[in-house]
Image (cartoon, helix red, strand yellow):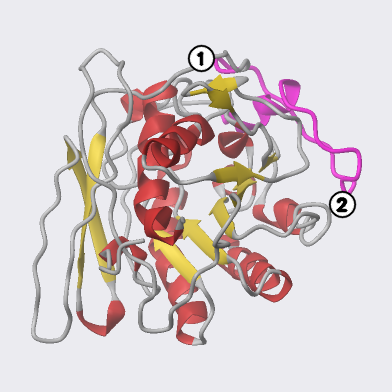
Amino acid sequence: MSTSTSPLLVRRGAFGAFARGIPLVGLLLVGSLACSSSTDNTDGSSEDASAGSGGGATSGGTPTGVGGGSGVSSTTGGAGVTTGSSGEGGGASSSSSSSSSSASAAGGTGGAGGSDGAAEGSSGSGGSPETGFQPCPATGPCKVLPLGDSITFGLGFDGGYRVELFHLAHQDGHEITYTGTQQMNGPAMVDGVPFPRNHEGISGETIQQIANRVPTPALRDIPHIVLLHAGTNDMYQNPNGADTRLGALLDELIADAPDALIVVSNIIPFPNGANAVSAYNAKVPGVVQERANKGAHVLFVDQFKDFPTSELGDGVHPNQTGYARMARAWYAAISDYLR
């Protein structure tokens, strides 16, 4: 494991987000037609569905990468604030100021494919060398919990971001597996090895509904790393107070999995709720930083910045290229915590 520090991995981060709007019926609930929740849904909620173009997940076979992807670069500012931008090709630059150091990270794509060819990049380095925090075991796979809604499930591309994330880890020699209790999906094999098809992506669920599954059943198998992307359904159901609900969910995760690394992102574009997304995303870094200031093992990742609406297959859920973009952002954040 590298001992250098990636700014994406700084435990305190902040980034304001902007959103774009196009006419669209709220489609996230359509995933409830394609995804079945675990029978032990503790809140007993039911998921509504509305007609849309992205109702079915399609299998990608055994994809090993998506070309034409973006790298992610970050620069740390004063007071531990992290800003980030992603650009094509996986390159990253670093800068420094009198109050803070900075480093670079680029989450490059792996494998071949995509209409624009394969972009190359290097994963960012990081960890928390000042504390020596290491969530993953010295031997055996690092258990990663993908937690969220139908975007975590992977509606629109079988296995979602989890496929490319597994590939990126595998090509760098890291052993990971996924945990979760929801309907298994994704390819049987990636890079010639069995793909772990577990996750905790629940279609149509809001932040509160996701929180109702913590600790049970989501943390039934305690993960070493949690990847949390939540709030899209709140944007058209009840955006007011979504950041407060996210904070409460984060507090529950910290309390129930204190030794895990909890990686929290803002949400990808949802054009039909652009204004709500912008307001919510602007608050997410502060929610994360507040917990980091208290010593929690939490990180912020910017999944919104430079995410084009052309990579939304139905206006809500990413297509294969969009999910690969998400994977690279996640990987840049966690790569140097992996063994």
Q: Which residues are magenta?
A: 26-54
- The type of residue carrying mark 1 is Gly
Q: Is residue 310 left or right of residue 57?
A: left
Q: Tell me if residue 286 comes above or below residue 91 in the rendering.
A: below
Labelled disc at residue 60: 1
In depth, the one of 326 and 277 nearer the eye is 326
Q: In the image shown, does 108 or 296 lie closer to the viewer?
A: 108
1 or 2: tag closer to the N-terminus: 2
* Horizontal arrangement in the rendering, residue 222 relative to residue 225 (left or right): right
Seen in the image, is 328 located left or right of residue 161?
A: left
Observer-nearest of 144 and 308: 144
Residue to which mark 2 is pinned = 43
- Which quadrant: the N terminus? bottom left
Residue 59, quarter of the rendered image = top right
- Residue 53 visible (yes or no): yes
In space, the residues marked 1 and 2 are separated at their CA atoms by: 33 Å
Q: Secondary structure at mark 2?
A: loop
Q: Quick check: 244 above or below 187?
A: below
The residue located at (43%, 42%) in the rendering is 169
Question: Magenta: predominant secondary structure element?
Answer: loop
Image spot of residue 318 (x, y percent)? 45, 28
Residue at horizontal 43%, vertical 26%? 23
Q: Amino acid at mark 2?
A: Asp
